[in-house]
Image (spheres, helix red, strand yellow):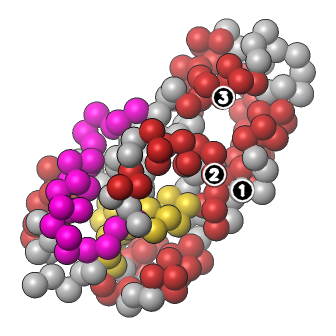
């Protein structure tokens, strides 16, 4: 029997595309024919951290990055364009998430960096709440990976020893931060490798 009782998942880059990364911004800006992208990126760099920590909401983020001047499109259109960028990742771990849930062997949750509103939308749109039971999102807890505090918070809320917890993330530094606290961090490099590792750990 596996010693692991809990699996925590990053979302963007493992199950879904990222919520609002530089490639997605370029796609949206091209579609909306946005000018002065350098000014937006400068403002985004300043505001992304408070946005992903829940200190400002989606409307405030857009107002301060985009709509501080008149634009030929509305904030609603911009938000819709941003939300449309979220799709299932090409090499997604979603089937593994579902298979692991079906075994009933472990509790599963998310541990990710995302704004509150985008996270809520993604959980609902892709039906993730039927598989996950705990939600450590930066937009909810005002902490971002790889800050050790977010991992410690997860362990304290779960009341699980670190040695029983697996954390999966596509960014090695985030997986390494979990490992440094005694968790089993896995850097996601593709669904085949993840399935093989979870099978070797006795979970599949």
| Residue drawn at (26%, 49%) of the image | 93
Indicate the quadrant where residue 75 lies: top right
Quadrant for the C terminus in the image: bottom left
Q: Label 2 belongs to which residue?
A: 116
| Residue drawn at (78%, 37%) of the image | 59
* CB under 8 Å between discs 3 and 1: no
Indicate the position of residue 48 as horizontal and vertical percent values.
Answer: 70, 47
Is residue 133 among the parts visible in the rendering? yes
Circle 3: element type: helix
Q: Residues within 10 Å of mark 1 (few under 14, many from 20)?
A: many
> Is-magenta flag for residue 101?
yes
Is residue 173 among the parts visible in the rendering? no
Indicate the quadrant where residue 37 lies: top right
> Is-magenta flag for residue 97?
yes
- Magenta span: 87-109
Query: Which of marks 2 and 3 precedes in the sequence?
Result: 3
Q: Label 1 belongs to which residue?
A: 54
In the image, is 37 to the left or to the right of 138? right
Q: Label 3 belongs to which residue?
A: 79
Compared to residue 27, the image places residue 173 above or below, namely below
Indicate the position of residue 16 as horizontal and vertical percent values.
Answer: 39, 42
- What is the CA distance from the residue labelled 3 to the residue labelled 2? 14 Å
Indicate the position of residue 8 as horizontal and vertical percent values.
Answer: 38, 67
Question: Between 54 and 178, which is closer to the camera in this rendering?
Answer: 54
* CB under 8 Å between discs 1 and 2: yes
The residue sitting at the right extreme is 69
């Amino acid at each position: 029997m596996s010693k692991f009782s809990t699996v925590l998942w990053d979302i963007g880059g493992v199950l879904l595309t990222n919520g609002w990364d530089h490639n997605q911004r370029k796609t949206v800006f091209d579609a909306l024919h946005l000018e002065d992208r350098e000014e937006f990126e400068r403002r985004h760099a300043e505001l992304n951290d408070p946005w992903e920590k829940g200190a400002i909401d989606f409307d405030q983020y857009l107002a301060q990055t985009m709509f501080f001047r008149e634009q030929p499109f509305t904030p609603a259109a911009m938000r819709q364009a941003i939300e449309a960028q979220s799709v299932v990742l090409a090499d997604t771990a979603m089937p593994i998430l579902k298979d692991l849930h079906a075994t009933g062997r472990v509790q599963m949750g998310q541990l990710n960096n995302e704004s509150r509103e985008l996270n809520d939308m993604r959980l609902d749109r892709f039906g993730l709440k039927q598989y996950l039971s705990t939600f450590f999102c930066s937009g909810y807890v005002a902490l971002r990976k790889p800050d050790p505090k977010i991992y410690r918070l997860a362990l304290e809320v779960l009341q699980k020893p670190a040695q029983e917890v697996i954390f999966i993330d596509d960014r090695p530094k985030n997986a390494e931060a979990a490992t440094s606290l005694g968790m089993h961090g896995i850097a996601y490099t593709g669904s085949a490798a993840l399935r093989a590792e979870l099978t070797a750990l006795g979970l599949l």
